[in-house]
Image (cartoon, rainbow, N blue to C red):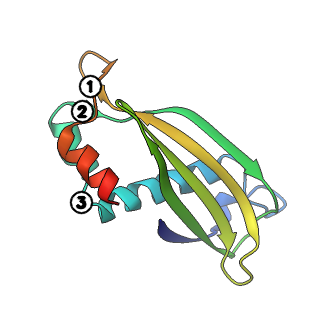
Amino acid sequence: MHKTEHRVIYADTDAGQVVYYANYFRWFESGRRELLRSLKIDYAALDSKGIIAPVVEAHCNYCHPARYDDIVSVETRISEAKQKSVRFDYKVFRKKDRKLLAFGHTINVFADKKKMKSIKIPDNIRKKIRMG
């Protein structure tokens, strides 16, 4: 499990200074990127080798609103690694009181960038995912 923090900025909110729902998916992406970085998996290096890992499924349940200037903590973990895909689970908490604001998941499929077809997760990546 990896933790990433984010301070809610005005641009994250709607007219009522409540976080706009789609921004939780941006935070999920940030959590996923930092979790992979902590496992020494570099998206840019994969891309240069013609490998991408797009999101093919995304889900979020909203429990309580985050508001302007809150600090949120995104907890990200890998809950499943299949032959071609990885499922990431997320929980978003308000830092000051640990109130659960949202939870969800994404599924990313590894793919050949040129052919846009799914591929097996490279062995070196699979090893790092399993060790994490």
Residue under numbered circle 2: 51
Q: Measured from the top left, where is residue 93 in percent x and y?
A: 68, 69
Mark 1 against mark 3, which lies toward the viewer?
3
Q: Identify which residue is drawn at 55% across, 57% down.
A: 27
- Residue type for callout 2: Ile
Residue found at the far bottom of this picture:
96
Whether residue 105 is situated above or below residue 108 in the rendered picture: below
Residue extending farthest left: 49
From the top left corner, tell me how far across and down residue 126 is, in percent: 27, 44
Sooner in the amino-acid sequence: mark 1 or mark 3? 3
| Label placed on residue 113 | 1
Mark 2 or 3, nearer chain start: 3
Given the image, on which type of amino acid does mark 1 rest? Lys
Of the two numbered discs 1 and 2 on the same chain, state the one appearing first in sequence.
2
- Where is the C terminus found, in terms of image quarters? bottom left
Which corner quadrant of the image does residue 53 belong to? top left
The answer to whether marks 1 and 2 mark residues whose Cβ atoms lie closer than 8 Å is: yes
State whether residue 57 appears in this view: yes
Secondary-structure class at tag 3:
loop
Looking at the image, residue 101 lies above or below residue 60: below
Q: Which residue is mark 3?
A: 40
Residue nearest the observer in this picture, 124 or 62 = 124
* Amino acid beneath label 3: Lys
> Image point 18% across, 46% down: which residue?
124
Please indicate whether residue 40 sits to the left or right of residue 55 in the image: left
Indicate left or right for 110 with 86 as reference: left
Q: Badge 3 local density, few (<14 within 10 Å), some, or many (20+)? A: few
Q: CA distance from mark 1 to mark 3?
A: 21 Å
Query: How many neighbours does mark 2 have within 10 angstroms: few (below 14), some (14-19), or many (20 or more)?
Result: many
Point out the frontmost of discs 2 and 3. Answer: 3
